[in-house]
Image: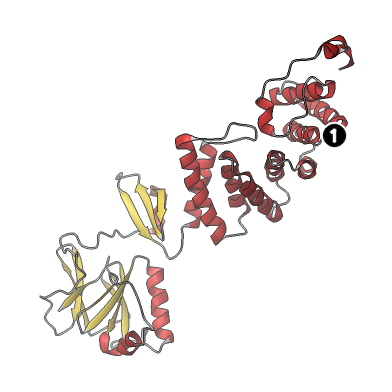
Amino acid sequence: MAIPLEGYSVVAQLNRISHLLKSNEVSATTRSVVSDGNIWRRSFMAEEDARKFLQELQERNVNVQFGPDPDAVLVNEFDQSIEPHCSWLSVSTYEKAVIGWRTGTDPNAIVAYEDWDPKAGSGLIFHDPEGEHDLEFVRAEDNIVVYLDRSSGEEVYVGRSSPPILSLFEAGRDTILKHFYSPGDPIVTGSAAEEIADAIDMLSRVTEEDPDAWGAHWFLGKGLTAVGRYEEAYQSFHRALELERDTEAIGRELAGVCLELKKYDEAVTVAEQAAALKPDDHTTLGNLALCYLFAGRLHEARKTILAARKLHPANESNNAIAKLIEDVTSGMRALPETISELSAPKPKRTIWQRLFFWRS
């Protein structure tokens, strides 16, 4: 009898590992394991996973290194190679499948899982990492990464031993940049919000796998801010700032979230730190002036926005901030509580304010 060999298969002489199977020291899903009574196999989509399993067997005194009579071997479906050299296993192509059997036995009968079809084979495609530049990341399904082959237009499924961190980060980052959100903008809704939610899931996986990746925390914070999840965004930006103190954009975004959460004093603190990194940047100074305004520190707000406008007199954002500061100072507008209020209509001036307009 024969069994199908798919992806990277660890094939063992059944009588050499039966004690491990009985004691449940070796386990696997039903679909990945097949045995014909002579040989036993467990298949993996990623070569690294298969080699890790071989290492586990070796630690249990299973010979996986020395031929010609090893206890277990690694078979590559794509080139039908066997490692190490083995005298007891024969391998051959059967229609679109690859099968293996104990040398000297009859391979005409095949033992396989229920829906196995030799006309379809495993459906796996060998992936050469050197050619990955031709593939465009589409999505990740557990440890299976789905790419679009630009040359053929077909989807390619690649097995990984762990989540594809770089691909997840790049996909999540690109989605956040596509729907770039700035503090004070309307909360993102509809299909864009759904795409951002997917990006948040990807970036969350990245931060779980690599908790010290400050860039992932920053983009995660941007995504969370865009859909109004300010408390979570606050935590993400804080973590990014803990990891990276010399990037002005982190403090800038954290200050914006602090304003939404009415943490005005903290907003001023982080905005001052950001301005210290870029003291001649009109945008950074404009953000600091806005934080001073929300904190009720009108003198510092006017002084800072004046410095920002000197650097770039035509900047529309800073001119609008300057007008807002003057309106609050003169009493024409109440002190705002959140950034979202900045788009609210101004209250009408009282008669008293109109009589003494010259005080502003």
Graded by Cα atoms within 10 Å as few (under 14), some (14 to 19) or many (20 or more), the crowding at tag 1 reads some
**Residue appearing at x 17%, y 63% in the figure:** 117
**Residue appearing at x 73%, y 19% in the figure:** 347
**Residue appearing at x 25%, y 59% in the figure:** 123
Q: Position of residue 1 (x, y in %)?
A: 14, 79
In this view, the residue in front, 80 or 30, is 30
Which residue sits furthest front?
Answer: 351
Q: Position of residue 184 (x, y in %)?
A: 64, 32
Say which element carries label 1: loop
Q: Position of residue 134 (x, y in %)?
A: 38, 48
Kind of residue at disc 1: Arg
Residue 302: name its quadrant.
top right
**Residue appearing at x 70%, y 41% in the figure:** 252
Residue 88: name its quadrant.
bottom left
| 324 sits to left or right of 141 | right
| 141 sits to left or right of 263 | left
In this view, the residue in front, 272 or 155, is 272
**Up-down: is 125 above or below 172?**
below
**Up-down: is 124 above or below 60?**
above
| 45 sits to left or right of 282 | left
Q: Is residue 3 visible?
A: yes
Residue where numbered disc 1 is placed: 297
Q: Position of residue 38 (x, y in %)?
A: 21, 84
